[in-house]
Image (cartoon, helix red, strand yellow):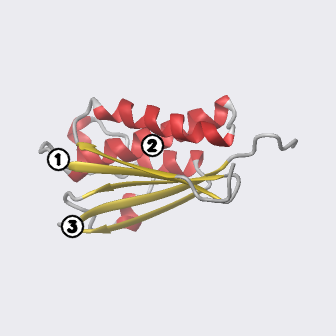
Amino acid sequence: MNSQQNEMELTFPSLPENESFARVVVAAFAVQLSPTVSEIADIKTAVSEAVTNAIVHGYAGTVGTVTLRASVVGRATLSIEVQDEGRGIEDVARAMEPFYTTCPEQERSGMGFAVMQTFMDDLEVESRPGEGTLVRMRKRIRSGVVA
């Protein structure tokens, strides 16, 4: 790989069918780092959770825009951002607690952020009520590293 950082950005409507599209796009972008099948599965799962949160909670039944960004950082780290301009989160720390959900009637488990934390190496969430949410995740690709 050359010394220039590679990056991509994709914007799509907050429709449920676009969640799987976002997963595949990020997986295809990540291939340049030679991830293992397990690392790809982790990345796809975390992206799925972030995009689903934007669709279900950010826009809550309305249609808005979700922006997905990915970039290569250094030689072996994938950085991913999922951003919406929806309702936002009033209390990010509380929302990140396992089993916390604002949609119990929809049988939501409240595990989205916990799943992202489990499968990614770093997770940051920025949100402002009425302005939307930005989820930043990083995954170090350990291909070729013997444990």
Pick the front one: 16 or 100 = 16
Which quadrant is home to the C terminus?
top right
Q: Residues within 10 Å of mark 1 (few under 14, many from 20)?
A: some
Residue bearing mark 1: 60
Q: Residue at x 50, y 48 (%)?
A: 116
The tag on residue 131 is 3
Q: Position of residue 64 (x, y in %)?
A: 17, 49
Left/right placement of residue 77 relative to residue 54 reads right
The image quadrant that residue 133 belongs to is: bottom left
Q: CA distance from mark 2 to mark 1?
A: 18 Å
Q: Position of residue 11 (x, y in %)?
A: 29, 47
Q: Earlier in the sequence, mark 2 or mark 1?
A: 2
Q: Residues within 10 Å of mark 3 (few under 14, many from 20)?
A: some
Residue bearing mark 2: 47
The type of residue carrying mark 2 is: Val
The residue mark sitting in front, 3 or 1, is 3
Q: Residue furthest right?
A: 146
Q: Position of residue 58 (x, y in %)?
A: 23, 52
Q: Is residue 103 visible?
A: no
